[in-house]
Image (cartoon, rainbow, N blue to C red):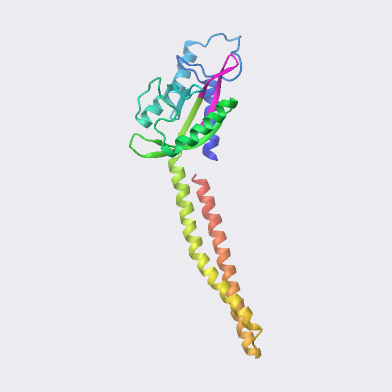
Amino acid sequence: MKCALSIINLTNLIMNQGRNTKYQVMQNTQPDARHGETSPQEETINEKILAHTTALLRISNPVGNSKYINKAWIDYTGSTFSNEHDFTENMHPESRRLYKNAWQQAVSENKEFSITYMLLHRSGEYRWICEYTRPIYTNGVCEEYLCTGIDIHDYKAHDEHFINKWTSILRTNFHDLRGAIGIVSGASGLLQLMEKKEDRDYTLEMIRRNVTQIQVLMDQLLAQFASEKNEHTRNS
């Protein structure tokens, strides 16, 4: 969630501020007539925002051909820019179909969308990217889309480690819980067959011990999970 909010805020900033020498990035509003044309100083500043941000930026037409790719994208993928750059270039094969479906749905309705996919890094490793795409309006017409991506691979790895760790913890402790519950269940059934008071008292005590063990184990698991989940959230 934190990554998603960050990338949306970044995209909104670029949509409000961004401009390079070829492409004006704007919302569905007309330029402020009081200010007229953007000054050379403002254009230089806004060009630097697009060129030097660490976010992976692309401006694509509705078909999906990229009309602009920033330096961060080229550095990240090792690709060279061309007018025929396809929007799924360098994506993992499993990500391409999902991305194309999301893109076509958004383009058909001129809507924004967000998606995670795997992109081939220049190192040869596929890494997870979170991307947020918004339509670019020129004179009230949607002709292009701004795609803003950030690398979330380490976050994903952190999440997977947390999930795998707790899967193992729960599997081990559920085995102990199942054993204790089995003892309680079996002993409860035997109570009906016992005639001697001392036998019933012994069995009831055994049931109480195992119920206490179950309660202690559950409390420990819940406390440990809450603590580690909070730590995991702080580091995400």
How many marks overall?
A: 0
Query: Of residues 40 and 225, which is closer to you in this image?
Result: 225
Vertical order, 108 against 199 (above or below): above
Q: Position of residue 192 (x, y in %)?
A: 66, 84
Taking 130 as reference, is 85 left or right?
A: left
Q: Position of residue 230 (x, y in %)?
A: 54, 51
**Residue 141 image-quadrant placement:** top right
Q: Residue at x 35, y 27 (%)?
A: 79
Q: Which residues are magenta?
A: 129-145
Q: Residue at x 59, y 80 (%)?
A: 206
Query: Of residues 44 and 160, which is closer to you in this image?
Result: 160
Vertical order, 225 against 52 (above or below): below
Q: Position of residue 168 (x, y in %)?
A: 47, 59
Vertical order, 195 against 109 (above or below): below
Q: Residue at x 54, y 69 (%)?
A: 178
Magenta-drawn stretch contains 67: no
Magenta-drawn stretch contains 141: yes
**Residue 226 image-quadrant placement:** bottom right
Residue furthest toward the bottom?
196
Q: Position of residue 14 (x, y in %)?
A: 52, 24
Q: Main secondary structure of the magenta part?
A: strand
Q: Residue at x 56, y 74 (%)?
A: 182
Taking 130 as reference, is 204 left or right?
A: right
Vertical order, 121 against 204 (above or below): above
**Quadrant, the N terminus:** top right
